[in-house]
């Protein structure tokens, strides 16, 4: 099963849930943790890890032969991201803006633009006891987080329960992590902001036809706005994590909470029953 842990905003507790859920299940089943929050991966902070290997992830990057270029400007006109500009028949390329669509290569009649490669990030492999951790790490300045996320997910072992720590929000990066998932756990908090972002994330999950349930983090007496919304939308609330100073201290120190390990372990059977 491919289980994605997502949230509408950062700081809601997505990584808290992903790291504890993976650790709680490792003794009972084949499980791995895949950190796809590639712009700021931090799942590794909660484990004593043995590093195994890393590999670069490459994508298309245009190579321009100025001796063949006619200065027709079609590459610049076709680029939706303004990564190419033609000045006095010279092509200026801005690699940070390039999204590797290949349009400039396709439309250049003079064949002055050909396919090259660029490194957008890397995938790291590590292990904490019996728990494998696969981490995508985007190069600073790269705009291609979705491509790295897709490459990272492809490295997951299909024979295991893959717990995927998604990027926050509802951008292209979050969509890349959610696409083709078997189930999505949406982590939220009992605030108007939390509800607003939960609604957006539910819309994305439904558009992608991914079944979802909710975990309320920092739960307190103001939960009504979240629980009422979930009831209206027929979305199960599987767990409410209390607003706890002790849990916050453990998390800030990179320690796993015994309370959360016990609580999260119980929800996996509920999730499997909903798929």
Image: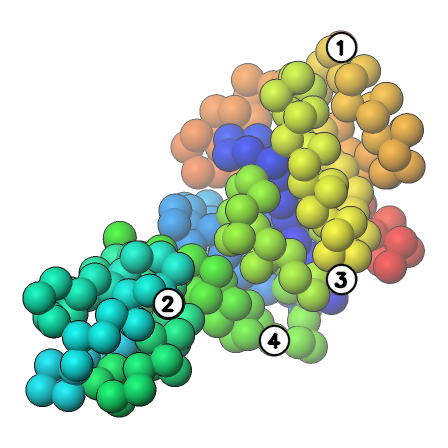
Q: Which residue is mark 3?
A: 182
Give the mark, 1 or 2, whose residue is nearer the N terminus.
Answer: 2
Q: CA distance from mark 4 to mark 3?
A: 14 Å
Q: Which mark is residue 221?
A: 1
Whether residue 75 sits left or right of residue 43 in the image: it is left
Q: Which residue is mark 4?
A: 157
Q: Nearer the viewer, residue 130 or 252?
A: 252
Q: Which mark is residue 272?
A: none
* Quadrant position of the C terminus in the picture: bottom right
The answer to which quarter of the image holds residue 177 is bottom right
Q: CA distance from mark 4 to mark 2?
A: 39 Å
Whether residue 67 sits left or right of residue 274 in the image: it is left
Q: CA distance from mark 1 to mark 3?
A: 32 Å
Q: Which mark is residue 78?
A: 2
Local secondary structure at mark 1: helix
What is the x, y in percent for residue 43? 47, 49
> As displayed, is residue 92 above or below residue 4?
below
> Quick one: label 2, few (<14), some, or many (20+) residues within 10 Å?
some
Whether residue 33 sits left or right of residue 40 in the image: it is right
């Amino acid at each position: 099963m491919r289980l994605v842990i997502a949230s509408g905003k950062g700081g809601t507790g997505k990584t808290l849930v992903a790291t504890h859920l993976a650790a709680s299940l490792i003794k009972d089943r084949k499980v791995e943790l895949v950190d796809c929050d590639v712009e700021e991966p931090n799942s590794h902070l909660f484990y004593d890890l043995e590093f195994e290997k890393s590999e670069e992830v490459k994508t298309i990057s245009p190579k321009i032969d100025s001796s063949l270029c006619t200065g027709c400007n079609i590459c610049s006109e076709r680029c939706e991201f303004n990564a190419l500009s033609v000045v006095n028949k010279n092509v200026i390329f801005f690699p940070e803006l390039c999204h590797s669509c290949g349009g400039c290569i396709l439309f250049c009649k003079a064949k002055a633009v050909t396919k090259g490669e660029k490194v957008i990030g890397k995938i790291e492999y590590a292990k904490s006891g019996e728990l494998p951790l696969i981490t995508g790490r985007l190069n600073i300045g790269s705009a291609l987080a979705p491509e790295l996320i897709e490459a990272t997910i492809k490295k997951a072992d299909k024979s295991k329960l893959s717990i995927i720590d998604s990027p926050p929000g509802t951008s292209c990066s979050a969509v890349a992590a959610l696409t083709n998932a078997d189930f999505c756990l949406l982590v939220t908090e009992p605030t108007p902001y939390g509800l607003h972002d939960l609604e957006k994330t539910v819309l994305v999950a439904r558009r992608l036809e991914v079944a979802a349930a909710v975990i309320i983090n920092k739960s307190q007496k103001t939960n009504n706005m979240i629980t009422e919304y979930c009831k209206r939308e027929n979305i199960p609330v599987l767990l409410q994590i209390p607003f706890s100073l002790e849990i916050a201290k453990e998390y800030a120190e990179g320690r796993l909470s015994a309370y959360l390990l016990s609580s999260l372990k119980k929800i996996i059977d509920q999730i499997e029953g909903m798929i």
